[in-house]
Amino acid sequence: MHYTKHTKQEYLYKLKDITSMSVNVDDIRKVVGGYGYDSRKLAEGKRLAEGLERLNSEVAKQSLVKKRMFAEKKRVQNEVHKKYMKFLKLSRIAFSDDVEAQGALLLTGARARTYEKWMTQVSVFVDNLLVNRKYIKTLEGFGVSCKEIEDVKVRLKQLNALSSECVKITGVVRMLNHKVKKDTVVMQHWISSYIKVARIAMEENPKVGKLIKQVIG
């Protein structure tokens, strides 16, 4: 039995089945005990299998947290971007003859494609609007209030916080996945050796051979 030949859930189920029955069924325990797999060693295999199952459950849990967090980040970013583009278009009209404002608000050129550069463009736009009352006054003539710009600034702070949390949870999931791979290799080494020994024991003890075969496949 090898983890590369089964789905993750199938592999974990087989591990649990093999290690639990080997520990709990007297006939199997007695037979393999004569080949070096005493209660202590069987308990070790069961412990490894249970640990790997718990670890995989934690990966699934944290991956769901990560998925939800990134979805929330995307939702907030889309909301901010929609408002930003509206204000940007109006600003390009309002300041079409004001070179200074165009530079201060980054009105010219293409919009950034990466998150970091996009965040810079939006932050500069919002911050420079809010520190220049003249710019706000001009935009008010186009239906944009100072309160609306301040609201975008608040959302940007929220987005920055979400972005930081996304970085953290990504690191957590990456670390857990690394541990899963490492522990799976340890588990595989144990189960491979055990199955080989169990097959030998099965051949020499036909009485319990059928039961062992049922467990190890």
Image (cartoon, helix red, strand yellow):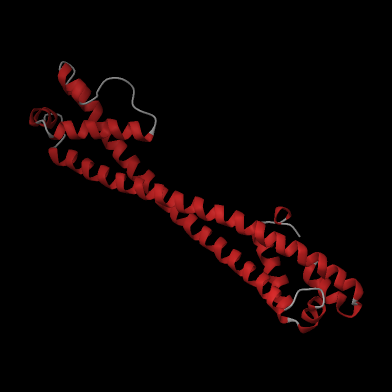
Residue lying furthest front in this view? Answer: 36
Image check: 12 left or right of 84?
A: right
- Work out whether residue 102 or residue 49 is closer to the camera in this orientation and state it: 49
- Work out whether residue 127 or residue 183 is closer to the camera in this orientation and state it: 183
State the image quarter where residue 121 is shown. top left
**Quadrant of the drawing holding the N terminus:** bottom right
x then y, percent, for residue 73 = 37, 46
Image check: 92 left or right of 212?
A: left
Residue 56 vertical placement versus 137 (above, below) = below
Residue lying furthest bottom in this view? Answer: 26
Q: At 11% from the left edge and 29% from the top edge, which residue is drawn?
A: 141
Q: At 89% from the left edge and 80% from the top edge, which residue is drawn?
A: 207
x then y, percent, for residue 48 = 63, 67
Q: At 19% from the left edge and 24% from the top edge, which residue is drawn?
A: 104
Q: Is residue 66 visible?
A: yes
Residue 190 vertical placement versus 157 (above, below) = below
**Quadrant of the drawing holding the C terminus:** bottom right
State the image quarter where residue 183 is shown. bottom right
x then y, percent, for residue 66 = 44, 52
Q: Is residue 85 visible?
A: no
Image check: 111 left or right of 21?
A: left
- Work out whether residue 86 or residue 49 is closer to the camera in this orientation and state it: 49
State the image quarter where residue 110 is shown. top left
- Work out whether residue 167 or residue 29 is closer to the camera in this orientation and state it: 29
Number of marks in the image?
A: 0
x then y, percent, for residue 74 = 38, 44
Q: At 34% from the left edge and 41% from the top edge, which residue is drawn?
A: 77
Residue 189 vertical placement versus 149 (above, below) = below
